[in-house]
Amino acid sequence: MSSLGNIKTIAKRELHAYFSSPVAYVFIVIFLLLNGFFTFMVGGFWERGEASLTNSFFFWHPWFYLFLVPAVGMRLWADERRVGTLELLLTMPIAPWEAIAGKFIASWLFLGLALCLTFPVVLTVNYLGSPDNGVIFAGYVGSWLMAGAYLAVSCITSAITRSQVVSFIISVVVCLFLILAGFPPVINLLQNLAHNWQWPVNLIASFSVITHFDGFQKGVLDSRDVIFFLSVIGFSLFATSVILRTHRTT
């Protein structure tokens, strides 16, 4: 079987595992409820009186993903190790990178499905006004890429432990750093501490998902931001493959 066939087979297996249990449905319901509540009740959508989702909808996604994405990714490899199927999977005639890609793609598609199901918010804002749908589309692209970055980080933490809870906690901590590194109050604090040394602050901020997601929210598809998220995904999946190789040889 070709590499593409192996990846498709593993991705189908993973998607079936999600929807054969209540996990997928609980996640989707919680995600949709949080988006609706924070957009219309907390995000000040009505108070602003403008047909825009920038500060009321996409603003909250880095924080939603902080807990929800690690909850999706924590089982990817930890569960395989816990039930003893990791060794079986790695002894099959497939390359480790095919298994990693298949699992990651399935989970990323699942997150994309949950994101697409927020379309009533887009329909609502179009009904109430005349928003720039190009900006909204860019926001969705950035949100999906950011979810992929969080998920790739969760792949690493899931590969290093048998415990889903431990994997979840470590993922949340790492993803929290990726948020706070560009969070305005943190940036202001670092600038006060650094005084005239601006480059360390800029360096730290460059690792933040907030910094790179901001452009997408404004409708700017900057290649640097796309490369950042894809680099996080690529590096994390490579690190996952290194970890799994150590399991395969021990």
Image (cartoon, grey):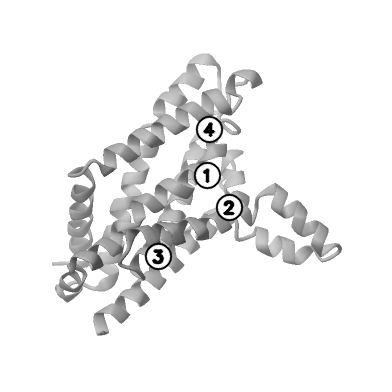
How far apart marks 3 and 1 lie (CA) works out to 19 Å
How far apart marks 4 and 3 lie (CA) works out to 29 Å
Residue 54 sits in which quadrant?
top right
Give how far across and how far down residue 166 sits, in percent: 39, 62
The residue positioned 57% from the left and 30% from the top of the image is: 56
The residue positioned 60% from the left and 49% from the top of the image is: 210
The amino acid sitting under disc 4 is Phe
Viewed as shown, does residue 82 lie left or right of 32?
left
Q: Which type of secondary structure does the marked residue at label 3 adopt?
A: helix
| Residue position marked by numbered label 1 in the rendering | 63
Contact flag, marks 1 and 2 (Cβ < 8 Å): yes
Q: Find residue 157 and name its label.
A: 3
Q: Earlier in the sequence, mark 4 or mark 1?
A: 4
Give how far across and how far down residue 152 sits, in percent: 41, 60
How far apart marks 1 and 2 lie (CA) works out to 8 Å
Q: Which type of secondary structure does the marked residue at label 2 adopt?
A: helix
Q: Earlier in the sequence, mark 3 or mark 1?
A: 1
How far apart marks 4 and 1 lie (CA) works out to 11 Å
How far apart marks 2 and 4 lie (CA) works out to 17 Å
Viewed as shown, does residue 158 lie left or right of 21?
right
Q: Earlier in the sequence, mark 2 or mark 3?
A: 3
On screen, residue 34 above or below 88: above
Give how far across and how far down residue 173 sits, in percent: 51, 58
**Badge 2 local density, few (<14 within 10 Å), some, or many (20+)?**
many
Figure quadrant of the C terminus: bottom left
Q: Is residue 227 visible?
A: no
| Residue position marked by numbered label 4 in the rendering | 57
How far apart marks 2 and 3 lie (CA) works out to 18 Å
Q: Earlier in the sequence, mark 2 or mark 4?
A: 4
| Residue position marked by numbered label 2 in the rendering | 179
